Amino acid sequence: MKNLTDSFVYLGHWPSAGSFGFNTDILATNPINLSVVFGVLIFFGKGVLNDLLDNRKQRILNTIRNSEELREGAIQQLENARARLRKVETEADQFRVNGYSEIEQEKVNLINSTSRTLKQLENYKNETILFEQQRTINQVRERVFQQALQGAIGTLNSCLSNELHLRTINANIGMFGTMKEITD
């Protein structure tokens, strides 16, 4: 490494007789070179740098605008969703209330219908009982009447002779004739 440094120092001591050489004096050459480089960069790079910064600024502003538009759209969608939720909740409450009132109404209707049906069945039962009682009473009367008639016929047949029998029939025919004249 010492050889490399010595060669640079040795090159710095060449005579400046119109030849090209290295100036190793850092303090004399660096500020001038840097100011020339910065000047050239600023002069030629200013437009490019401004264009790059303007493009970057426009992209940032467009991104911010897009973000704001997306945010506003999301807020609008959120408000729409909340409105739909409120509407659905209101409809659900109405269905619930209507459902409960309809259930109560159906319950009352069912109770009333069942009560009417039970009353009709009770009436049919009572009518059937009365009909059966009347039929049974009529059957008993008919049997009693038949038995009484058979007993009377048997008694008449055993007690009455033919002559008594004919007189009784004539008397009854006379009574029927009198009754007929009264009714006419």
Image: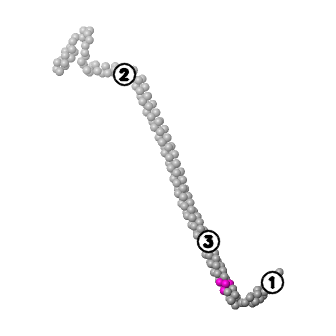
Q: Which residue is mark 2?
A: 41
Image-quadrant location for residue 98: bottom right
Q: Residue at x 25, y 13 (%)?
A: 21
Identify residue type, mark 2.
Leu
Q: Which residue is mark 1?
A: 177
- Determine the residue positioned at 61% across, 70% down: 120
Q: Secondary structure at mark 2?
A: helix
> Residue 124 got which mark?
3
- Front label number (3 vs 2): 3
> Would residue 149 be counted in the magenta stretch?
yes
* Residue at the (64%, 79%) spot, across then down: 139
Asked if the stretch drawn in magenta spans residue 112, the answer is no
Q: Earlier in the sequence, mark 3 or mark 2?
A: 2
Question: Is any atom of residue 36 visible in this view?
Answer: yes
Left or right position of 133 against 61: right
Q: As displayed, is residue 131 above or below residue 4? A: below
Above/below status of 169 relative to 56: below
Observer-nearest of 7 and 140: 140
Residue 7, position in %: x, y?
A: 19, 16
Give the class, few, some or many, for how many residues have Cα within 10 Å of label 2's Cα (few <14, many ≥20): few
Give the distance between the C-alpha atoms of the residues marked 1 and 2, in whole angstroms.
160 Å
Kind of residue indicated by mark 1 = Gly
Q: Looking at the rendering, which quadrant does residue 118 occupy?
A: bottom right
Q: Is residue 114 left or right of residue 154?
A: left
